[in-house]
Amino acid sequence: MAQSSTETDWVSRFADEVIAESERRAPGKPVVVASGLSPSGPIHLGNLREVMTPHLVADEIRRRGYEVRHLISWDDYDRYRKVPKGIDGVDESWAEHIGRPLTSVPAPKGSSFPNWAEHFKAAMTESLAELGVEYDGISQTAQYTSGAYREQILHAMRHRGDIDAILAQYRTKKDPKAQAEAQAKKSQKPVDEAELEAAEGSGAAAEDDGTGSAGYFPYKPYCGSCDKDLTTVTAYDDDTTEMTYTCTACGFSETVRLSEFNRGKLVWKVDWPMRWAYEGVVFEPSGVDHSSPGSSFQVGGQIVSIFDGKQPIGPMYAFVGISGMAKMSSSRGGVPTPADALKIMEPQLLRWLYARRRPNQSFKIAFDQEIQRLYDEWDKLEAKVADGTVLPADAAAHSRAARTAAGDLPRTPRPLPYRTLASVVDITAGHEDQTLRILSELDPANPVTDLDEVRPRLDRAESWISTHVPADARTVVRSEPDTELLGSLDDEGRESLRLLLEGLDTHWSLDGLTTLVYGVPKVMAGLTPDAKPTPELKVAQRAFFALLYRLLVSRETGPRLPTLLLAVGADRVRKLLGA
Ligand SMILES: [Zn+2]
C-alpha cells in the first residue's frame, strides 16, 4: 500500500502498480524495470525521459525496501543507419559503415573509445552517474555475440509463421515517423525536427520486420564478409538449424548453423518483446512513437506471448522540449544532451523537472533566461520544505529530486540565488577574486568566505552565462563615466544620484542597497523610506533605475541593481555616477 506522505504523486502510484504486478508474475523475485537507449550518436536530452521515468519508479520501490533491477539496454548491436551531422571528428567517409552494428563502426577521430557505440555511451554513462541513476547496463552486442539469446532466436525461427501472422495485421499501417508528420500536419504545427530525431533515436522504428522474397524470417545476420545487415535469409531448416543467407551489398553467401552462429539479431519488433520475456520486465515506458497503433510496443504486446512472456506496464511518455538551445545546437550541428543540461543546472534541478510532471505531460528544459525563474521556484520549494509548509505532492517531487534510496545527491552548501550568481559572474567574467569579493559583500553579517561554499551552483551559473547568454545580452560595465548624459541631467536627476552616493557606505549589502535604490525616489517625492508604493512612485522608480543602468552599463536594463552595484564596487560606482 502507498505511504501516506507520497501517495499523491504519479511515481508512487506506478510503484504500487508495479510492485503488485511483479508479485503476481514472479513472487519473491526482484522487480525488473527497463529502459532502452541507442548510442547511434549523441543521446538527445529528450531521450532522458526513457531513463528517468523507470528510474524514479525504481527508486520509490527501493525506498520501500524491495529489490529492484533497472535494466538499461544499450541497443549497440543495432545497425548504423546514418551519419549524424555536425559531430567532431566524423566526415562523409563514415557512410561506408552504414548497415554495420554500432559497435563495429569506428569512433570519431580523436576519441579514446574503441568504437562508435562506446564513444556515445560514455557521455551518457557519465551523466547518469551524476544524476544518481542506479542501473544494470546490458550491451546487446555482448548478449547477441555471446549467444545469450540462442534459445530465443531458435524459438522465434520455429514460430516465424505465428510472428508473421501478427505482423501482417499491421503491415498496411504507416510507420511512426510518417504518423508524427501526419499528426503535425493535422494540428497545423510545424514538424519539430528534434521530436522526429527523438522518434528515430529511440528504437529502430523504420527497420524492416524480416519479410523477404524467400518468406518471413525474424532473424537478420550481419554479413560474414562485409559485416553489413543488407542480408536476406534464403533458406532455413528447423531440424538442423541450417540457415542460408546472401548479402545484397557484397554478394557474399553462406550457410551456417544457427545453433552455433552468433553474428546477427532478431528484428526490432521481435527483439524487444523477446527481451521483455527474457528479463521479466514489469515496467518499461516508451515514447509516443512506440505507443501508436501498429507500433513496436503494441505489436510487441502480442509477440511477447510467443516467448511465453507478458507485456510490461508501459505508460506512454510525452516529448520533452528544449528552449533556448535550438539555434545554438543547430548552428553547431549537434543535439542537446543531458551533459549539456548538467553543465548549467545541478542534477537535483534536472531530476525535479521529471519528477514533478506526469510522464504524459510534456515540458521544456530551459537553456534561456527561464532557467533563472526555474531556480527561484526550486529555492522557494526548498524553503517550504525547510519550514514545513510544503504540500505533500510538492514534497514528494522535491524528495525524488534531492535524493535517491542511496542517499542525498551532493548539494551546494550555500545555495545563493542562481540569478544573483549569474549576474555576478556576468559582470566579473569569471574572475574568482572579484567574484569572492562581491559575494562576501552580499550579506556582510554572514559573509561568503570561500567560493567552495557556493559551488557547484556557481559553476553552473557561470557556464550558463558564458555559453547560453548571447553576447548582446551580456553586461558590460562602463570604464569611463558618460559625461554627456551626466551633463544633461536636471537638478532632480543630480539630486537623486547625490542621495544614492551619500547612502552607499551605510547600505553596502544586498539588503541595504535594495532599500537604498527603492528609497531614493521615495525621498525625492517627499515620502518616508518605508512609504507604500503608489503608481506615481513606481514610475519614478523605473525612471531612476533606467538612469542608473544607462550610467553604469549603457543600457536601459541589466542585472538587479543591488547586485549590479555590489559587483561594480563602491569606488567605480562613485566614478561612473559622477561624484
Ligand atoms: Zn556483405
Image (spheres, rainbow, N blue to C red):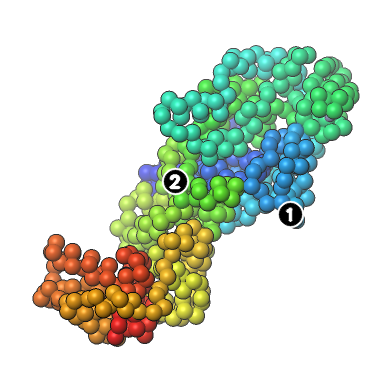
- Amino acid tagged 2: Lys
Say if 222 sits above or below 16 in the image: above
Say if 474 sits above or below 184 in the image: below
Q: Where is mark 1, residue-wise? A: 111
Determine whether the residue tagged by mark 2 lies in a helix, strand or loop: strand
Q: Nearer the viewer, residue 377 or 465?
A: 465
- Amino acid tagged 1: Ser
Give the quarter of the figure containing the C terminus. bottom left
Q: Nearer the viewer, residue 526 or 46?
A: 526
Q: In the figure, residue 281 lies in which quadrant?
A: top right
Left-right relation of 53 to 139: left
Q: Quadrant of ligand 1?
A: top right
Determine whether the residue tagged by mark 1 lies in a helix, strand or loop: loop
Give the quarter of the figure containing the N terminus. top left
Q: Nearer the viewer, residue 361 or 479?
A: 479
Left-right relation of 212 to 356: right
Q: Where is mark 2, residue-wise? A: 364
